[in-house]
Every structure is written in structure tokens, then in C-alpha cells.
Amino acid sequence: MNSEFLAILEYWEREKGINKDVLVKAVEEALLSAAKKAVGPARELRCAIDPKTGDIRAFAKLVVSDKVASKHDQISLFDARRLKSDAQLGDEIEVEVTPANFGRIASQNAKQALMQHIRRAEKELIYSEFKDRTGDIVSGTVRRFERSDVTVDLGKFEALLPNRERVPTEEYQIGERIRCYVKAVEQSPHGPEIILSRADPQFVVKLFQLEVSSSTTRRWTSSAGTRTSNFT
């Protein structure tokens, strides 16, 4: 699970721009419930994920005591000095309390918490990046079909080209690159959703504007190059 867990974190940081440290923190917080069930009511329990190895460990702060009445709250002076040579009665010492087989239990909780956080973070990124891009032309790759709707991969995000926004005579192939008009960013039951169109009249207008702008730039560059050549 460790290498798999780290690979998931690195993928979402690289491909989706979701900070790995943020994801690690979210998972560590979620792991507390699993740790409390496995360890018991340990004092100031926390979980930590080693960012290099992916190892999941549990720690508790125990009070150094002459007599240990509760192993969840206290540690003997003898055991404390094995961990910290200058430990004194009344000191607080953080002790690893990772139970056997905790990694398997924790991994299940970690994966569930991770995917929940990723879904929330991705929805927030979709809204923040596309809320002001309605009316833009974007390029993407046809990823899959759901009935007659098309899911388009825009790189960091996926968008929906609904059947109602398709040109009836057009057929698409998975992996095909297409350009679309960002018609809206709608709030669906699953969060923000980017709605694309190739049938909206504004799509043709925008494409025409882009072509005119591109042609003007090419003519200006060509003309400038000619004038420079004549001058020299």
C-alpha cells in the first residue's frame, strides 16, 4: 500500500495541481478515527505518514509516572528513560503506539479519505479556474461516451459535451482532439461541471474571431519581415 499510496499522491499533485502536503494532512486527520479504534483512548493521539516511505504510524503523548495506572495515559520512568535518557517524573513523552496490522486498517481509511478530499479539491479547482472562462474556446481529447454525451479531457479537468450541444452530423472517436465552446460552469449534484458546446452559435463566432486574429497576425508578421528585409 505504501508505494501505491505515494504514487496516488504524486499523480494528483502532478496532474491535477493538488498539493501533496495538503492531501497527506487530510489523510492523517482521517486516520485518527481508525487509530482510536485500534489503539484505544490514548492521550493526544496522532497519526503521521512518512512522505518518503508512506509508512503510517500512530503516536501518543504519555506522562512519565512512578506507577502506571493507565497505559493509555502514562509511561513508567524506566520505560521513558529507554526512549529519553533524561526523562523525569511528570514529563510528557511522545511514544509510538502503532498496533499490529494497523497499516492494513489504516490504508483502507486512507484511500477512502484521500479520494473524498481529492473530489472536493478538484471541484474547487474546477470552479475557481473556469468560473470566468465562459465564452472561451478550449481544446481537449475525447475521453469516453455516456449514452450520447461526450466526456472531454481538458488536461487537469474533465468537461461534458452534452448530446444537446453536439452537432448532429458530427461523430467523434475516443482519443480525437476537438475544440469546444465553454458554455457554462454549472453546479450539479456532484459539484461544479464544465459544460461544453459545438452547436452554440457563439462557437462559430468565436472560431471566426480567432481565425481573423490569427490571419491578421500572420500578415503583419510577413509584412514586417518584408519591410525589414527591404530596409537592410
Image (cartoon, rainbow, N blue to C red):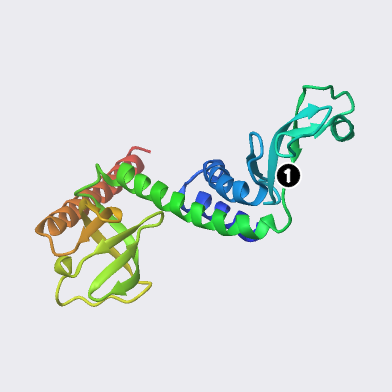
Left or right of 47? Residue 140 is left
**Quarter holding the C terminus?**
top left
- Residue drawn 63% across the image and 39% down it: 46
User: Residue 77 occupies which quadrant of the picture?
Assistant: top right
Quadrant in which the N terminus appears:
bottom right
Figure disc tally: 1
Q: Which image quadrant for residue 164?
A: bottom left
Question: Which amino acid, mark 1?
Answer: Val
On the image, numbered disc 1 is attached to which residue? Answer: 97
Report x, y in % for residue 136: 23, 50
From the viewer's side, name the closer residue of 81 and 158: 81
Residue sitting at 58 percent across and 51 percent down?
A: 34
Q: Is residue 100 above or below residue 165?
A: above
Front position in the image: 200 or 29: 29
151 displayed left or right of 62: left
Which residue extends farthest left? 201
Q: Is residue 107 found left or right of 96 in the rendered image?
A: left
* In the foreground, 36 or 211: 36
Task: Estimate the x, y position of residue 139 in percent, counting from the top left.
Answer: 31, 59
Determine crowd level at label 1: few under 14, some 14-19, many 20+ residues with C-alpha closer than 10 A.
some
